[in-house]
Image (cartoon, rainbow, N blue to C red):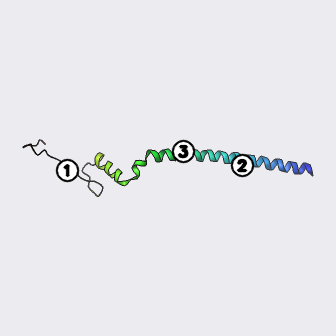
Amino acid sequence: MLDTNLSKLENESLELKQKIKSLLDENGKLLEKLKQAETHLTANRGWNSSSQALNWLNTHHNKNKKGPGFVTKRTVYAINRKYVGL
């Protein structure tokens, strides 16, 4: 009877060791994903504000586009010049 109980306990301990190993592996993978998400968040934190993104679009990609997000650039002419070159 003692031998059967001992063998059952050994089998249970092996199963638990395997579960612990799989859980530790899964935990390591989740930690790696968390680190990647944090680095991605810090790299793209500036784009969380919509006004900053729209300002960037206006300054870099405003090729005759119209709509609520695109503002046409106003040309400023020098006041003290009579003729302005085009």
Q: Are marks 1 and 3 in contact (CB under 8 Å)?
A: no
Q: Nearer the viewer, mark 1 or mark 2?
A: 1
Residue type, label 3: Lys
Residue at point 86%, 48% (across, down) = 7
Q: Which residue is mark 2?
A: 19
Residue at point 73%, 46% (across, down) = 18
First in sequence, mark 1 or 2: give its number: 2
| Left or right of 74, for residue 23 | right
The residue positioned farthest toward the front in the image shown: 80
Q: Which residue is mark 3?
A: 35
Q: Secondary structure at mark 2?
A: helix
Q: Are marks 3 and 2 in contact (CB under 8 Å)?
A: no
Residue at point 87%, 48% (across, down) = 6
Residue type, label 1: Arg
Residue 42 is situated, as x and y percent measured from the top left of the image, at: 46, 46
Q: Which residue is mark 1?
A: 74
Residue 47 is situated, as x and y percent measured from the top left of the image, at: 39, 49
Question: Disc count in the image?
Answer: 3
Separation (CA) of disc 1 from disc 3: 44 Å
Q: Residues within 10 Å of mark 1 (few under 14, many from 20)?
A: few
Q: Secondary structure at mark 1?
A: loop
Residue 45 is situated, as x and y percent measured from the top left of the image, at: 43, 48
The residue positioned farthest toward the top in the image shown: 85
Separation (CA) of disc 3 from disc 2: 24 Å
Q: Secondary structure at mark 3?
A: helix
First in sequence, mark 1 or 3: give its number: 3
Residue at point 47%, 46% (across, down) = 40
Of the numbered discs in the image, which one, if any, rests on residue 48?
none
Q: Residues within 10 Å of mark 3 (few under 14, many from 20)?
A: few
The residue positioned farthest toward the right in the image shown: 1
| Left or right of 7, for residue 37 | left
